[in-house]
Amino acid sequence: MYAKLSSRIVRFDLFTLYLRQPELLFFASMDLEKTKEQLINVEKEIASCQLCPLYKTRRNIVPGEGNPHAEIMFIGEAPGAREDESGRPFCGPAGKFLDQLLDSIGLQRADVYIANTLKCRPPANRDPLPEEKSACRKYLEEQIAIINPKIVVTLGRHSTETYLPDLGGITKLRAKLYHRANGIFFFPLYHPAAALHNGAMRQTLLDDFAKLPDAIVQVKAQLAKQKKENAK
Ligand code: SF4
C-alpha cells in the first residue's frame, strides 16, 4: 500500500515537474547517477579491505544493494553461506521472509536499500565479533551518508546494538522510533531469521512491520517541522 501510494506520488510529482520545470528532471537523474557512483566507490573500498581477518576467508564481499535514493534502509547482521556465494544480502530463507514482510506493506526490494553490519562472512556463521563490527562500521556509515534514508531499520540484536547501544535489548526497543543525536531515525525489528522456525515470532514480525509506514509518516512530519524551524 505504502509503496503503491508513494510510487504514484513520485510519478505524479515527476509529471508535475516535467510540466513546470522539465530541466529539473535532468538534474534529478544526474543526482541519481552521482549517488550510484558514490556507492560503487564504497564497494571498491570494501573489495580491497583488510581491516579485519574476515577478508581472508570470504568468497565474495556483500556490500549491500537496492535503491540508491531509498527512504528506508535495512541493516542486518552479517552475510551467511548463500550471501558469501552470491555477493548479495538476504538471499537465503531469511531473505525470502524479508521479501514477504516488505510485500505485506506494499514494498519490494527495489524500493529499499539492504545492507549488513559486516560485509564479509564470519566463518561457520558465528556471531560478528565486536572488533569486526567496529572495523567494518565505516562502510555502513558511508552508505548511510550517501543514501540519506528517512529511516534506518536495524534487523536483530547486532545492528541494533551498533546504533542504539545504550537503550536496552532488541525485545524492549523493537517497533519504536528513535531519533539519535547524529540526526538519523532508527526503527529496530527482530531479525527475519529468528522467525524461520517460530510461528509466534513470525506473527510478531508481521505485526511490527505493519507499524513501519506510520513511523515513516512520523519521521517526515518531524523533518518538515525541523525545516520550518530552521527557516525562521
Ligand atoms: S568484514 Fe568489513 S572490516 Fe572486515 S575485511 Fe570485510 S569489509 Fe573489511
Image (spheres, rainbow, N blue to C red):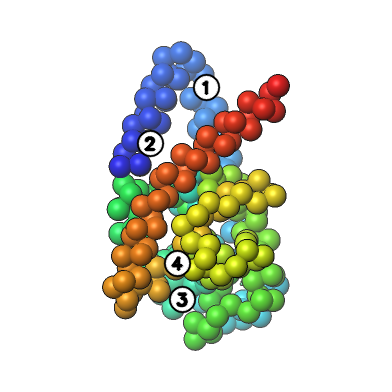
How far across and down, in percent of the image, does residue 127 sit? 55, 80
Judged from the image, the secondary structure of the residue bearing numbered disc 1 is: helix
Say the numbered circle drawn on residue 190: 4
* Residue carrying label 3: 80
Q: Residue at x 39, y 68 (%)?
A: 192
**Amino acid at circle 3:** Gly
Please tell me which residue lies in front, 126 or 44. 126
Relative side of 167 to 25, left or right: right
Marks 2 and 1, the one that precedes in the sequence:
2
Q: Quadrant of the N terminus?
A: top left
Mark 3 and mark 2 residues within 8 Å of each other at the beta carbon: no
Disc 1 under 8 Å from ligand 1? The reply is no
Please tell me which residue lies in front, 29 or 92. 92
The answer for how far apart the CA atoms under marks 2 and 1 are is 20 Å
Kindly give the residue lying farthest to the bottom in the view shown: 124
**Amino acid at circle 2:** Ser
Q: Nearer the viewer, mark 3 or mark 1?
A: 3
Marks 2 and 4, the one that precedes in the sequence:
2
Marks 3 and 2, the one that precedes in the sequence:
2
* Residue carrying label 2: 6
The answer for how far apart the CA atoms under marks 2 and 4 are is 25 Å
Decide: few, some or many residues near mark 4? Use Cα within 10 Å; few <14, some 14-19, many ≥20: many
Marks 3 and 4, the one that precedes in the sequence:
3
Marks 1 and 4, the one that precedes in the sequence:
1
Mark 2 and mark 4 residues within 8 Å of each other at the beta carbon: no
